[in-house]
Image (cartoon, rainbow, N blue to C red):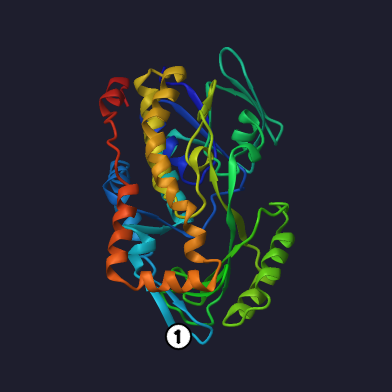
Amino acid sequence: MTGSSVLISGASIAGPALAYWLGRHGFRPTIVELAPALRTGGNAVDFRGPVHLGLLRRMGVLDELRAAQTGGTAMRFVDADGRRVMEMPADFAGGDLEILRGELSRILCAAGGDRTEYLFGDSITALAETADGVDVTFASGRERTFDLVVGADGVHSNVRRLTFGPERDYVSHLGYYVAGWAMPDELGPGRDTLGYNVPGRLASIGGDHRDPARAGAFVVFAAPELSYDRHDLGAQKRLVHERFADLGWAVPRMLAALATADDLYFDQICRVDIKPWSRGRVALVGDAACGATLGGMGNGTALVAAYTLAGELAAAGGDHTVAFARYEERIRPFARRAQRGGAGAGRFLAPKTARGLAIRNWLHNREWFMTMTYRIAGDRSAGITLPDYRETRERSGF
């Protein structure tokens, strides 16, 4: 039944998008977010193709997103002396619309208006399903009951762990790690991203679209799965420093900035595989269900999945036993196609051999290869026809 309460874990992209559509269908969404407030800045994320842009238009946020977009960033790969060896145009990485993750979250949350309740600075510690709902215990000590719970909390989903079991059962390491942090703009890359490779490693610097005096450092390195504490900033800095301390180009300046950085992002390139995406009154959406850290079009998939999950719940009158199965049936094939791009992201950014680097550079300097690459990316962001749930919403009176 519409009017049901739905707790959503995660306020990045999938969570606010789901809350928006649930609110439009007459549900009562609540978002719990570990961070004390919406995160600002962050890396740039992109959308491409009529499916992604069409949903943003339906949400009424497309014009605002375009006004805040970065405009895309060209990727220019250079040698140790700064000479160009390969270049990727801005729309290769940025798609049809590129925007900083923090700006996207802010706009999506605002779109939900007063239909969504937010609980910042808290997280779920226990879930207990009953015949009538899910009893939720929070880290703050509060306890509440919701009709449904949805994990929209990324590849390291807390809801998935509590409901389905340990992360190791569902997350596959794809052979690479990535890290990013802020630094002074000493190279003057402007709007471009400059990248320097040696086999198995990439170090890059990109201009900050908000502050021309700042830049973003980004590194990728090949490694087997590592054991480290995801909440230990010092340990993660040491891992990055150990892998890049012997390199030249701008790397010494990047590592100097890393030493004092308080905004480090560090994670493995991985893929989430879980079936089914729901258990009882708990479901997963976005990266929690089908994530791929880089290259998997996770942001567009999150939008599509959020729209469909909310729509199917409305179409089923809030009956999760029907809606969760229909949602997964519609979205899983689309999500799996999009995920395929994640498998090759590390190999593209940091080929493991000198020969692999040379082949990558040669191919991406060829127009025919770039045309094929664009076509593949377009196919992965399309290939799905979404139902129009407006009639369902009109019947509910919202």
Seen in the picture, residue 384 relative to 353 is either above or below; the reply is above
Please give left or right for residue 336 compared with residue 235 in the image. Answer: left
Seen in the picture, residue 300 relative to 319 is either above or below; the reply is below
Residue 396 shows in the view:
yes
Judged from this view, the residue extending furthest toward the top is: 131
Quarter location, residue 72: bottom left
Residue under the point 54% across and 20% down: 280
Quarter location, residue 26: top left
Residue 292 or residue 29, whichever sits in front: 292
Residue 119 or residue 273, whichever sits in front: 273
Q: Rate crowding at label 1 as few (under 14), some (14 to 19) or many (20 or more) other CA atoms within 10 Å.
A: few
Residue at image mark 1: 83
Judged from this view, the residue extending furthest toward the front is: 355
Q: Secondary structure at mark 1?
A: loop
Quadrant in which the C terminus is drawn:
top left
Residue 68 or residue 50, whichever sits in front: 50
Query: Horizontal and vertical percent for residue 333?
Result: 38, 36
Query: Horizontal and vertical percent for residue 243?
Result: 67, 69
- Identify the amino acid type marked 1: Arg
Residue 282 shows in the view:
no
Residue 272 or residue 125, whichever sits in front: 272
Residue under the point 64% across and 60% down: 223
Query: Horizontal and vertical percent for residue 227?
Result: 72, 52
